[in-house]
Image (cartoon, rainbow, N blue to C red):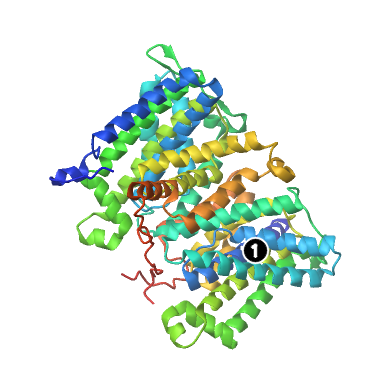
Amino acid sequence: MRYLFKTDYRQDTTLWRHRGDLFWYGLLVVVLLVIPYVLSEFYVGELGGVFVFAVAGVGMMLLAGYTGLISLGNAAFLGIGAYTDAILLTHGVPLLIALPVAGLFTGLFGIAIGLPTLRMSGLYLAIATLAFGSIVGTVFQKWDAVTGGFDGFAVPAPDIFGVPIQNATGIYYLSLAVLVIVLWFSANILRTPLGRAMVAIRDSEISAQSMGIHLARYKTFAFALSAFITGLAGALFAHYVRFLAPDAFDVLLSVQFVTIVFVGGLGSLHGVILGALFVRLLPQFIAIMRDDLPFGIGRMPGLEPSLYGLVLVIVILFEPGGIYGRWIKMKQWFQAYPLKRRTGFRRQKSYARSERLR
Amino acid sequence: MEDAARLLQLVVNGAAAGCIYGLIALGFVLIYKATEMINFAQGDIMMLGGFFAFALIAHFGLNYWVGALLAILLTAAFGFALDAVVLRRVIGQPQFAVVMLTLGLGFIFRAAAGITWGYDSVGFETPFTNRTINLHGLILGQDNVSIIVGTVLLCGVLYLFFSRTRLGVAMQASSQNQLAAYYMGIPVRTVFSLIWAISAGVAAVAGILLSPVSMIDVNMGFLGIKAFAAAVLGGFGSIPGALVGGVVIGIVEQLAGYFLPAGFQEVTSNVVLLATLILRPQGLFAELAGKRV
């Protein structure tokens, strides 16, 4: 077990806690870079999907996990990013420009939805973003001139400096690169005053405001940031699926994003990765297990959404810290062995906080 | 003359659909007023109520009225158990944990109903199916009229219950101030579970009334999203507001479908919802004055 002796306030905001972190993350990146040479194309493709969802999950995490604003409309952001990227590419814009432009354009929508929802509390916000999401979904379906309606939209194969990206491996590396950049960017934001302000808003709006945090500005920023990152994920998603169908961006997808942050663990970037792994690999797991499950459970239609629902319920009831929270507890148990204290992670007794005057 | 009759018919159809939205919204509001939770699974509870009625009436061959009453009671018991077993545990967790919890429950209910009753639309014979009333040349479907009449009757019963009975007054008291209600010897937890039961029962009534108009199927819970618009328009905390909001949304939706190009009907309720939240977030019937620090 390693003891950290902090001798400087700046040690609280460093990106790496100690050199061991740097080593392990470096090792992880090397492993991820080697994977396409080891695993079959199918698994590489699936991992690429995990990365795409992880990018979208980071967008959701900054909003829900760090600023405490729940959004049930992030699928709409993903869709806007996907269509923007695809349309730009058909007009001959290179990928390296189309990708950030898709993100920025989606970010504008984030500001547009963020501004009017500023004065809403958690519940109203969830409902408003849900409504926004379903309006955008309907627009995708009905505006055939731009989105191709139900005929779908074939996404052209992109290239970077003449190197075409069309197979699963190309998408894998592209999404991995974007994911690493986005994670690094988010980790950096979270250790600036900006990120601290977001966390303060999450913990208590009123005390944040009393400390001089401009609520409207930071909340709008959080929305814009979340939409920007989700837009990037959307662009990757477009290349990942290669064919955009308007009904892909529905409420179910938004719920998947929220599942990523809840199951992974609210308020941690590690949790995003774990959550994305869970959400993307669960259907594959079911597909593999399909024939082995008893009573034909595996063949029942509608099994996936119900399993998402079930896991969500179990996590919220029994482990609000998500998978990452459970991992921290396990790590602590091993580090302290055999001196585990039963009260170490005991949850404080909590009471409902009323938002009413009367 | 033709146009006026057509318009009136649209309004009646809209009001009937609106009553359903209003009833679901009523369920939201009852729970929100009492526990400050929003039940995203309300639409799915309505779906369960519809399926319970279907099972009792079509499968076991019960009389319509007996079957409907039993289905309502079953759904209410289900709502009671839901609160007592699951939702009571999350009191004190952040609000959106409840949002996600009820969303997850909704998915589970949908899958459970699909596994039990299949994913096809089903229906059962009601006394109102395919019958019409002729009012001086204005032809109305009895199914639509039954929805409106049923809603009005249910509201009357609920009004009498909340204002005249001991339990109803205890529920009002617990909604207004939990601590004071405890001090007065009201078993607040049980009362909250009973409120969930009432809310589930109201949802079941909505599902049963809706069954002659549109069939019962697993995805009818998505009506709940439209009911949000009704609740928000009414001010989320006002019972008459929820019903008025529902009727307004239903009528506006029908008119939008008639006068505006295709595609607008689907988004009407959402547009109304967003517009309400932006222009008048407290809704038409503001009840909650502000936020406690």
Q: Is residue B272 above or below residue B151?
A: above
Residue, x 37% and y 65% (percent of image)?
Answer: A348
Q: Is residue B165 above or below residue B290?
A: below
Q: Position of residue B20 (x, y in %)?
A: 65, 63
Q: Position of residue A157 (x, y in %)?
A: 49, 18
Tag 1, which chain? Answer: B
Which of the 4 image quarters holds residue A96?
top left
Q: Nearer the viewer, residue B238 or A345?
A: A345
Task: Give the left or right position of residue A193, taking residue B106 as reference.
Answer: left
* Extreme residue in the top direction: A162
Q: What amino acid is at disc 1?
A: Ile
Q: How many marks?
A: 1
Q: Nearer the viewer, residue A251 or B104?
A: B104
| Mark 1: few/some/many CA within 10 Å (<14, 14-19, 20+) | many
Task: Name the residue tied to disc 1.
Answer: B20
The answer to whether one can see residue B20 in this image is yes
Task: Give the left or right position of residue A230, taking residue B143 as reference.
Answer: left
Q: Position of residue A141 (x, y in %)?
A: 58, 37
Residue, x 32% and y 28% (percent of image)?
Answer: A26
Q: Nearer the viewer, residue A197 or A113?
A: A197
Work out which quarter of the rendered image holds the C terminus of chain B and state it.
Answer: bottom left
Residue, x 57% and y 82% (percent of image)?
Answer: B162
Q: Position of residue A78 (x, y in %)?
A: 46, 37
Task: Give the left or right position of residue A173, taking residue B85 as reference.
Answer: left
Q: Is residue B140 above or below residue B157?
A: above
* Extreme residue in the front direction: A338
SS type, badge 1: helix
Work out which quarter of the rendered image holds the N terminus of chain B and state it.
Answer: bottom right
The answer to whether one can see residue A123 in this image is no
* Extreme residue in the right direction: B61
